[in-house]
Amino acid sequence: MALMAFWSVSIAANQKLYFYCRSFKKTRKCHNQPCRYSKLFTILTCGKQREQNFYSQTTLSPSTYEKIDYNKLSPMLRHYWDTKSEHPDYLLLYRVGDFYESFFDDAQILAETLEVTLTSKGGGKDLGCKVPMSGIPQHSLDKYLSILLKKNVKVAVCDQTEPATMAQAGSLVKRQVTRLLTPGTLTEDSMLDAKKNNYLAAIAVDMSSSTKEFNRVNWAIAYVDTSTGEFQGLEGKNIDAFIRELIRISPSEVLMEDNPIWKNILQEQCITYQLPELCYTARPVHSFDSQLGKQQLLQRFHCNSIEVFGLKDSCLLLKACAAIFHYLQETIERIAPINLNFFRLHRADEFVHLDENTLRNLEVLETLREGNKKGSLLWSVDRTVTCMGARLLRRWLLHPLRDGRILNARYEVIELLIQNCDILSGLVDTLKGFNDLERLACRIGSLRANEKDFYHLGESLKKIPRLLHILNRLISSSIDRQKRVVDLLAAILSPLSEELIQVIVEEIDANITLSSPVSTSPHVVDNFTGSNSESVLFVQSGKNQQLEELEKEYKLHMQWMLEYERNERKRLGLHNLKVGYHKSLGYYISISKRALSKVPNDYIRKQTLIGEERYTTTQLLERERSILYVRECLASKEREIFDNFRNHLQQYAPSLQRIAEAVATLDVFCGLARMAMEREYCRPQLYLLDDEEKNSSSSAVVLKIENGRHPVVEQMISPGSFVSNSIDLSHQSSRLVILTGPNSSGKSCYLRQIGTIQLLAQIGSFVPAQEAQLSIMDAIFTRVGAVDDIGSGQSTFMVEMTETARILRQATKYSLVLLDEIGRGTTTLDGLSIAWSVAEYLSSNIQCLSIFATHYHEMNELASVFPWVINLQVKVIEKDDQVIFLHKVIPGGANKSYGIQVAGLSGLPDVVVERARTVWRTLEQVGMQLNHVLKTQLYQISNGNENVSREKSNDNMLMTNGTKYNRMNNSNYDMESLQEQLKDMKRQLALLDAQFQEWLTKEKEIR
């Protein structure tokens, strides 16, 4: 599924990739009120146009509604219909007793999505028919909500706002929508991944951009995590960067402008990108109002000018922010405003460029084949012990830095922790007891915290003094370190004010306690507490006299119940008689079936069960009314006290968020230090280049790794069995590696190993190597593996070429490019020509550091043509038609790929393998002649194209290669001779084909 992107590229002569959005308008009559709503579709095809539902909005076909007369519906269904008409884009869950039910079209969607039973319900006496109905138990609501939201279905929850027993006879129980849930606005921990941010993003695009150069369109993305309060944004002028950043943010929901201009523009534009399945929600144009965004920013953060955010009046980011604010007010902020952190603007050059292919090929967040976290780079380096630390590490991996000063400071802190193992151990033990302060702080600031949240907050804050004590020891041991390290530790320490924490903890302890329910009876279950179990949180009565009086009165009623139970047991002579409570029945007397003969006449039957009968009495009913009244007063007063307490602690939310950020940062540092100690990682040496050096032709970019290891593979196999490998690249000596070797020998692992080491170094982590000297890269590009995209009509080869084209367009001199098997999926000559040309372009035009893994052994000749190209191969041992992989990368180029041997190891039938060897021997004779011709032509082409570059790089090598070039020019390989040789090769191939057909015929006869 793809999002709108805005640049044009020609795929082939008569073939374009079309992409556009269409808004389908439908009209539904709800209580004679026309309700306009839309569904977002996309079309992404090659040559043909195909519609695909984004599920951006839960709008359903109006077929059911058209058949029903509203006035004949039952009162409850009329209320359901009215509520649905107010929220047409949401699936409505309507509380009925112990269930949440949906009707009409919503019932069909609910049944299909959750795979629950679709049934029916009488629509009313006058209607004369039933309506579709489906439902879920109220105790499983969160479980089913999670499933719906993961499938991008927005949900409106309509709850009962009064007890059924309090409703007047003959009237409906009062209900209203209490929650509007969308994938991007969740705050409930039960529906969120504790170790992953849940972002809501809004995109704004400059519609005045020239459609002829749509690749240069101005864009902006604002994104917020409503569960943690993070609020950030970034802008750009390149659609490649737009796609890259949207994938890196990976929002759960994306807001876009519902404007007819989108359709006209996107129908004319082509696209070569395909995004993962995100939830896209079309929003009205007026919600993308820059003035609204400016006003909301100033009001929410109490500022006088938007310049403090780094923004300007007319910038696109204000429109994106406005859409965020408008959407929050319509959904989650209907109850209370979200407490957002101060808006943070990111620069485009702040982070290393990581596109979707690099994230996938390096398996940064999940494995390539199964999409599991185990086996990913994140899994291999995650040693955090808090949820907020895990989320921060994930953000670091997705946003590697290009600021060498910050990276070196991080190295210093990790090194300091490694050198003080006892301090590191103490920090980790203390951090293990912390709850998710980041999300707790956000709920407190948004007035959504409950008693349990405050209790967990208090327990976590009580660990801060110990954390401060350990940190002060660490700082005292870093006095001789560089100033930037001391500053970084001080920045972590500054929010952890012991005085402030003491004030907050005292406030919580004075109002929140952990205790058992008020009821002391093992039988009389108090509905006010919700259960009769231990460890229930209550607000302490404290100094409130009215609350204390209500609690005393309530306890007296409970004592009366116990006394009443004893008296009835004694009066009837039934030791098993029990007085209980049920939320639907109220208080009752339970008598077993065997003792029914002793039931007195003053008992009134309430309910019949299999093993017992339940009764009440006039005296019990009178006492029940008194208890319910006291309970309601008690609950109201306690809620009032708690609300005042919560409002009072709201002022500490910003400080708590800063404390959470400091704890998360410390957790990440401790985790990286533990990993470096466990796996024997080394501190990389960074080479920093200022702007003057970058503009200089003599600037050196270095990538030198001694005995590097792949961090994931090393942990997945037995200890000590991983074979380490080295590499030494630089602009001056060798910037392109041609890597050859057998299949399954470890070439792809070697490529990914280099990429992950560079990535880890630029998040501030130690790296799996004996020694590493690295320059800061502005981008990491990878092209590994063979995939197709059937949905968009792209073959494996087309996907490969598209990804390669993107790399060649975006890479700079300071990028790291890792390519594997470019040019397959077509003929050998075509593939080799493309691979050769790509390698030349990378090393000569872009001049970036590159590793090019290939089975085209002819490319080894590039090292003889260009002084900056070196050959490496993966060493193997061949013995008795068998191959032993050593997984060791050594200098030199391989001349065999051992594909047949690898095929034999994979389990192919022996007859197939033997026949392959026979065919190979014949083809080898033809291939030797073909290679001879190819090498001659490639020498001539490369020498002719690169004569000027070679003069600048190395005069001695120019003379040497010039001699070779002259010898080849003076040889007898003119065009006529080449044509004759090619004809001869075709004849030999025809003969080989005839032999193969003869062999097939014999095989059929034998069978």
Image (cartoon, helix red, strand yellow):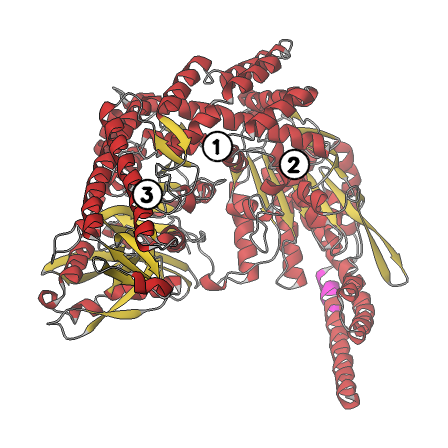
Residue 221: which quarter of the image? top left
Q: Position of residue 138 (x, y in %)?
A: 33, 54
**On the rendered structure, is 213 left or right of 157?**
right
Q: Is residue 999 visible?
A: yes
Residue where numbered disc 1 is placed:
435
Q: Are marks 1 and 3 in contact (CB under 8 Å)?
A: no
**On the rendered structure, is 304 left or right of 492?**
left
Residue at 77% across, 40% down? 724
Alpha carbons under labels 2 and 3: distance apart: 70 Å
Residue where numbered disc 2 is placed:
757
Q: Is residue 731 visible?
A: no
Placement of 267 over or under 645, stated as above or below? below
Characterize the local packing of mark 1: few (<14), some (14-19) or many (20 or more) Cα atoms within 10 angstroms: many
Give the magenta part as a residue range. Answer: 975-980
Characterize the local packing of mark 2: few (<14), some (14-19) or many (20 or more) Cα atoms within 10 angstroms: many
Residue where numbered disc 3 is placed:
562
